[in-house]
Amino acid sequence: MRRFAPIAAALVTLAVAAASWVMDGNAPVVEDSRPVTSDRPSTPAAKQTSTTSRNANRGGFDFYVLSLSWSPTYCDSEAGRDNRVQCGTGKRFGWVVHGLWPQNEHGYPQDCDSTQGSRVPDSIARGIMDIMPGLGLIGHQWRKHGSCSGLSMEDYFALVRKAHDKILVPPQFSSVRQPLQTSPTALEQAFIRSNRGLTASAVAITCDSQGVDEVRICLDTSLNFRTCREVDQRSCERSDLIIPPQP
């Protein structure tokens, strides 16, 4: 039995070394990835596969994506039911700004280093809550996307306001009091008709299992409409959509 003692000791030594190697963080890591533009889980019809770059250089991107979210769809979700700021009693939000996202032709930067810090002061946040309801949403959008714009917080949220005000929501979709049945194509065409210069290759409609989720519009850094093939290709592929009514 003694002749096996050196072998057993060697095996124990190897096991300890392997455990230490893993705990030190030297083991191979599978890189995480997420959809190209969505901050929420994508539906199969809107699934996107490009990976993103973390801690990219501030201002290093190709264009913006303005994401307008239909608030009643979000408020019908599990997450929305707990959001009293956007979805509580008496809240009648329609199209709200989900974000203004720096985007590349393939993928996008996120979570960039910024000398501005991570907390958005109340003086800035309160001034945009009418179109971007929720301090949590505002702070998250700054940290994840605004930090990559190369702008100060004040200038970034001023640009969010300017981008929002540029878009004319089609009258038939601006205020919905009863469930409205439409299609991604009809909604997209209505936005195109209402916004001169907007083309089908510069806008995408996303959806959840049944209803409209967001309208995503691509803008250059001067806020002119521009094509965005990767974003456009990820439009909802349903033949019909429900737009839930505002409360």
Image (cartoon, grey):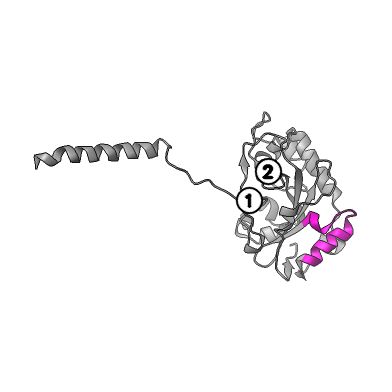
Q: Residue at x 67, y 44 (%)?
A: 108
Q: Residue at x 73, y 37 (%)?
A: 149
In screen coordinates, is 196 left or right of 62? right
Can residue 175 be seen here? The reply is no
State which quarter of the image contains the N terminus: top left
In screen coordinates, is 156 left or right of 110? right
Please state the extent of the stretch shown in magenta in the rendering.
Answer: 185-203
Residue 231, x across and y down, in percent: 72, 54
Can residue 49 be seen here? The reply is yes
Give the crowd class for mark 2: few <14, some 14-19, many >=20 residues within 10 Å: many
**Which element is circle 2 on?**
helix
The residue labelled by disc 2 is 141
170 w.r.t. 127: above or below: below
Give the amino acid at mark 1: Ser
The secondary structure that dominates the magenta segment is helix
Q: Residue at x 45, y 42 (%)?
A: 28
Given residues 129 and 222, the one toward you in this image is 222
Give the crowd class for mark 1: few <14, some 14-19, many >=20 residues within 10 Å: some
Toward which corner of the image does residue 184 lie, by quadrant?
Answer: bottom right
Give the amino acid at mark 2: Gln
The residue labelled by disc 1 is 50
In screen coordinates, is 9 left or right of 229? left
The image shows a total of numbered marks equal to 2
Residue 196 is a magenta residue: yes
Residue 197, x across and y down, in percent: 89, 53
**Which element is circle 1 on?**
loop
Residue 114, x across and y down, in percent: 66, 31
Q: Residue furthest right?
A: 196
Residue 119, x across and y down, in percent: 65, 35
Given residues 168 and 195, the one toward you in this image is 195
